[in-house]
Amino acid sequence: MVLTRGARIKSAQASFDVKYVANGLDHARLGYVVPKRLVAKSVRRNVMKRLIREAFRKSRAGLPAVDLVIR
């Protein structure tokens, strides 16, 4: 799939909502949101954030130049 600047694609798996758009850089970037109303305990929210960051870190080299937003 070829993404152009401004193209948005949305995918939902389980409780994650992933949106991405081509960024015009030579690497992928990550943004994430773990809402307090969905994950009330701060410990669980922080664990989820660490898991998202680690998964992105491990797969970053294989990703195209996109901006990812995970919610």
Image (tube, helix red, strand yellow):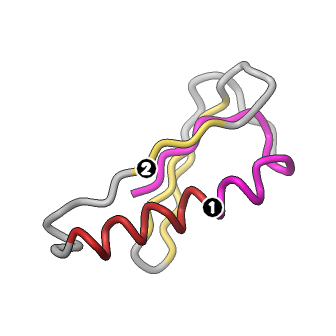
Please name the residue shown 36% across and 65% down the image: 46
Q: Which residue is mark 2?
A: 32
Amino acid type assigned to the residue bearing label 2 in the image = Tyr
Please name the residue shown 48% across and 67% down the image: 12
Q: Is residue 56 magenta?
A: yes
Mark 1 crowd level (few <14, some 14–19, many ≥20, 10 Å Cα): few
Residue nearest the viewer, comparing 44 with 32: 44
**Which of pointers 1 and 2 lies earlier in the amino acid sequence?**
2
Location of residue 41 in the rendering, given as x and y in whole percent from the top left corner: 19, 75
Location of residue 62 in the rendering, given as x and y in whole percent from the top left corner: 86, 51
Q: Quadrant of the C terminus?
A: bottom left
Please name the residue shown 53% across and 68% down the image: 51
Quarter of image, res 20: top right
Mark 2 crowd level (few <14, some 14–19, many ≥20, 10 Å Cα): some
Magenta residues (range): 55-71
Please state which of the two labelled residues, at mark 1 or mark 2, is closer to the viewer: 1
Residue 55 in the figure: left or right of residue 53: right
Indicate the secondary structure of the residue bearing disc 1. Answer: helix
Which mark, by number, is residue 45? none
Q: Which residue is mark 1?
A: 54
Residue 28 in the figure: left or right of residue 29: right
Given contact means CB atoms under 8 Å apart, are the residues at marks 1 and 2 in contact?
no
Location of residue 16 in the rendering, given as x and y in whole percent from the top left corner: 44, 68
Please name the residue shown 65% across and 25% down the image: 23
Most distant residue in the bottom direction: 14
In space, the residues marked 1 and 2 are separated at their CA atoms by: 12 Å
